[in-house]
Amino acid sequence: MKAPILNTLFDRNEVTPPADIEAAALRSDRFRLEREGEWQRLEEILARLEKGRLRKLSDEDVLALPALYRMAASSLAVARETSLDASTLSYLESLVQRAWFQVYGPRQGFFAWFRRFLSGGWSRAIREIWLDICIALAVMVAGTVTGWLLVARDQEWFFALIPAEFAGDRVPGASREALLRGLQAEEDTQGLSAFAAYLFSNNAGVSILAFALGFAFGVPSLMLLVHNMALLGAMLWLYHDAGLTVEFVGWLSVHGTTELFAILLAGAAGMHIGRKMAFPGNRSIMAAAAESGKRGALVMLGVVIMLIFAALLEAFPRQLLGMEGRYIVGIFMLLLWLAYFFAYRGRPAERSL
């Protein structure tokens, strides 16, 4: 009578009978014993890899790693389905996670990745969006010409294009001497670091906005490029009208060859995403956006680096050098970027990230 009563109590309280608990434990032990050798071998291989002892691994162990990982993952799936004991599940989850990282995870740290990025990954991403760069360059030239022509026809356009706080004394009607004073080198270097930080923040904002607006099929990015270059065209007209074209171009070139190049790349990267979304080809729009977005992100990371250089050049060499020095620095930076982006390909092993 006791046995049926005991079973009834277990049923009522939904408690697993001792016999079932014992059977589950035996099943878990048998499952572990049958596969424990494979798990231990995988764990030994992982321990050596995690300690950086790849050279001490035999060819057999290296070749066996993917297979051992798949067997451990299969064991984990079975263990979850059959509700084996918690310790076995925890052990397998940790083992599979470690193995996945070694089989599929990144093979390099941040500094190794960054070295490869500078050694060819960045320039390769830029070459892959060459068509968008050509379109963005044409738009920037058109924007500059538009700004020049608008102000040349009606000087009121100058005040419409250029904010008053940016223009300062540089306005139509200003004397040649007043305009020239703004282009002369400074002897006092105090405050230039803060000025560099401000310029970087401002230029980074323009570049990021040009990139971010690319999702709308690139049209807003192009409009932003036109607007910013129309501002440059208006300033070019102002100094040309005062007979200071050479001085102004030298003043601008020391940082402009880097800064304008960065803005060009940011706009092209944004337009690349928009163009791929508008014309995805045989892929879905989401797949095209994901691929172009990854490429654009690489370009934008480099743009940030260029803007840091541009801010430093704008705050220090531009303010401290004479006209000849400004031209030398500006031309050198332009040739450096062109050589790096379109001539330098990196070593074959470093071309992809």
Image: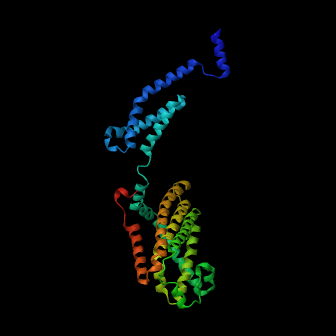
Instruction: Tell how many labels.
Output: 0
- Residue furthest right in the image: 12
Dividing the image into 4 quarters, which one contains the N terminus?
top right
Of 188 and 37, which appears nearest the observer?
A: 188
Whole-percent x, y for residue 329 in the image:
41, 77
Q: Is residue 353 visible?
A: no
The residue located at (55%, 82%) in the rendering is 235
Of 121 and 2, which appears nearest the observer?
A: 2
Whole-percent x, y for residue 190 in the image:
50, 76
Dividing the image into 4 quarters, which one contains the C terminus?
bottom left
Q: Image check: 323 left or right of 206?
A: left
Q: Is residue 250 visible?
A: yes
- Against 106, is 229 above or below? below
Q: Image check: 216 left or right of 94?
A: right
Q: Quadrant of residue 178?
A: bottom right
Q: Quadrant of residue 7?
A: top right
Whole-percent x, y for residue 118 in the image:
41, 62
Q: Image check: 157 left or right of 66?
A: right
The residue located at (53%, 71%) in the rendering is 194
Whole-percent x, y for residue 122 in the image:
43, 62
* Render colour scheme: rainbow
The residue located at (43%, 77%) in the rendering is 330
Q: Quadrant of residue 55?
A: top left
